[in-house]
Image (cartoon, rainbow, N blue to C red):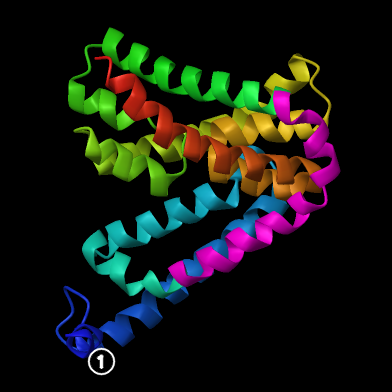
Amino acid sequence: MIAADLMAVPAPFSSWASFALAAALWIAVTCLAYWLALRLSRRMKGNPVFVPVATTSLMVMAVLWISQTPYAVYAPATKPLNWWVGPATVAIAIPLYGQLERLKRIWKPLLIALLIGSVVAMASAIAIAWALGGSWQTLMSLMPKSATMPIAMPMSERFGGLPALAAVAVVITGVFGTVISHPLLRLLKVTDPAARGFAIGLTAHAIGMARELQVNPTSGSFAALAMGLNAIATAVLMPLALAWV
């Protein structure tokens, strides 16, 4: 049975040769788009509007649209890239380990900020969508918008939302949060890198964290911490909140 599974060609490809060809093509397209996005970000002097994660996604979507390639072909072809998520996640913990002593001193305010931020993110999404006449499916799709995509999509689907709409909401939240976070934090006179990074990671998840890692190592470390903790908090608080509905 295991051998049969290992030999199974990923859908919708008809043979391993066609899968290998598609994988080489779409992985190359994705890497090229990311390289161009990095150059564009540097050319724009790190302007948050051109955050590489978002511009890479836009470029790949444009190529898929122009070539009339369905996502069902692109997703399995680029699945080998997913392997790097594990090492990348571990690498994020390395700079955070350098902040261990500081974390021991400020874990209480961080925990309070996490709970308030997570609850406000979910409640505000529901309140706005409900005020605009959104259906239950829409509310459940938008509720986990501030969590990372691997958490938001299954949580949305579990409670009757649309995973695709949840994914769009996560991306929009990340890009919008990244763009407005720095001007807003400057306006509020929040200068501590730990506080800035934690706030951005809590609201703008991986997209905000990716930019903070480029701007300031300390801010990036706390953004990574906030992103991970908010993913856990969303997975715990969302079922508890909906149990009262």
Tell me where residue 175 appears, x and y as whole percent.
52, 37
Residue located 56% across and 38% down the image? 229
Which region of the structure is painted magenta? 82-108
Q: Tell me residue 241's x, y (percent).
A: 35, 20
Crowding around mark 1 (Cα neighbors within 10 Å: few <14, some 14 to 19, many 20+) is few
Q: Secondary structure at mark 1?
A: helix
Would you say the magenta stretch is mainly helix, strand or loop? helix
Residue shown at the point (31%, 79%) measured from the top left? 22
Q: At 25% across and 91% down in the image, what residue appears?
A: 17
40 or 4: nearer the viewer: 4
Q: Is residue 140 left or right of residue 144?
A: left
Q: Give the residue at the far top of this rendering.
A: 131
Q: Residue at x 37, y 70 (%)?
A: 79
Check if residue 119 falls in the magenta segment: no
Residue 53 lies left or right of residue 214; in this view the side is left
Q: Is residue 204 above or below residue 245?
A: below
Q: Quadrant of residue 73?
A: bottom left
Q: Does residue 70 show up?
A: no
> Total number of numbered labels?
1
Residue 191 image-quadrant placement: top right
Which residue is denoted by mark 1 in the rendering? 17
Q: Which quadrant of the figure contains the C terminus?
A: top left
Q: Position of residue 194 (x, y in %)?
A: 78, 34
Amino acid residing under circle 1: Ala
